[in-house]
Amino acid sequence: MLTMIMKEKGPRNWRWTRQRRIIVDALQGRTDHPTAEELYQSLREQGADVSLATVYRNLRALAREGLVREIHGEGPDRFDPFTHPHYHFHCLRCGRVFDVELPYRQELDAVDLGLGFKVLGHELVFWGLCPDCQREK
Amino acid sequence: MLTMIMKEKGPRNWRWTRQRRIIVDALQGRTDHPTAEELYQSLREQGADVSLATVYRNLRALAREGLVREIHGEGPDRFDPFTHPHYHFHCLRCGRVFDVELPYRQELDAVDLGLGFKVLGHELVFWGLCPDCQREK
DNA sequence: ATAAATGCAAATGCTTTGCCCAAGT
DNA sequence: ACTTGGGCAAAGCATTTGCATTTAT
């Protein structure tokens, strides 16, 4: 899917290299918002031949094109293959980030913050304990 | 104010050093969510004698005690002296973070995300262009 | 006196970059 | 051919930490 979208929306001088393909495919296959390092490790385990620098370069490039989402928080950045607006849950204990199926609140993008702030979007992050971490302690 | 709160809520073995005092006072005096480095620079300009490491150590310690809030995003972490629940606006162009006076949506902390997720709070961040940056371009 | 806090510099973690070569179009 | 992308290793930031010394209680 992403591959198709990228062919349409990516820059025309976008080259479809072996590395770019496997990075995109690997990210698409996951719903756990991996860090660049995590993605890199799983690729290596599968025997793929990429460098960490290339993983970073590609993820950032995809983000610049709006084809993946960067998630900032404690620790290293995470990457989300889903770009349609949706929310996240951040576990305070294990640090993992989960997708939340709550409907996107369009109204929030229409709020008037006054003073000439131009709202282009919003982000809603819930934090607490994920199922696993609740069980453990 | 923070000083008072800290005397009550801080750990009993909390020592009131000269550096800690000026760091707390400096942060309280600002509404622009400075980075550790920014706070450090302004202290030095005032002739205060602190090290960057100490600024970091104190800000993190305050955060651990729940007396200040850490803000993660692109670039270095920022610090917010306000701990009562409130929202932020993040400017995509200059990276500054502003407070938003929208009322806190208690209901959102009561959402059931199912599957045993325990929600302890939420964060709402609007992003777009701040007044200054809209003017400039 | 004792434990906590500081300064400094070195270490660390994450991420980017320069350069030169390889590969896609 | 042209130029983007990759690998590697070095550089860059932001942040933390070890250690010897100072300072608050």
Image (cartoon, coloured by chain):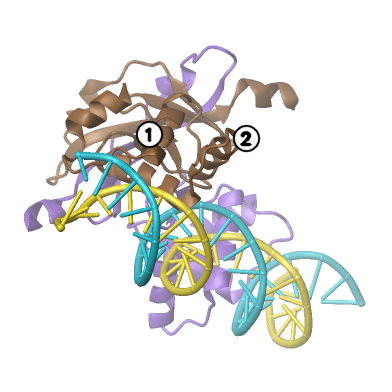
Chain colours: A brown, B purple, C cyan, D yellow
Q: Quadrant of residue B135?
A: bottom left
Q: Could you say which disc has been placed on residue A94 in the image?
A: 2
Q: Quadrant of residue A9?
A: top left
Write down the chain letter for disc 1.
A
Can the viewer see residue B21? no
Q: Which amino acid lies under the numbered mark 2 shown in the image of this protein?
A: Cys
Residue at 23%, 41% in the rendered image: A14
How many residues crowd around disc 2 within 10 Å: few (fewer than 14), some, or many (20 or more)? few
Mark 1 or 2, closer to the camera = 1
Residue matched to label 1: A21
Q: Position of residue A134 (x, y in %)?
A: 67, 23
Q: Nearer the viewer, residue D8 or A72?
A: D8
Label 2 element class: loop
How many residues crowd around disc 1 within 10 Å: few (fewer than 14), some, or many (20 or more)? few
Q: Which amino acid lies under the numbered mark 1 shown in the image of this protein?
A: Arg
Q: Quadrant of residue A19?
A: top left
The residues bearing labels 1 and 2 have C-alpha atoms spaced at a distance of 30 Å
Q: Position of residue A124 (x, y in %)?
A: 37, 30
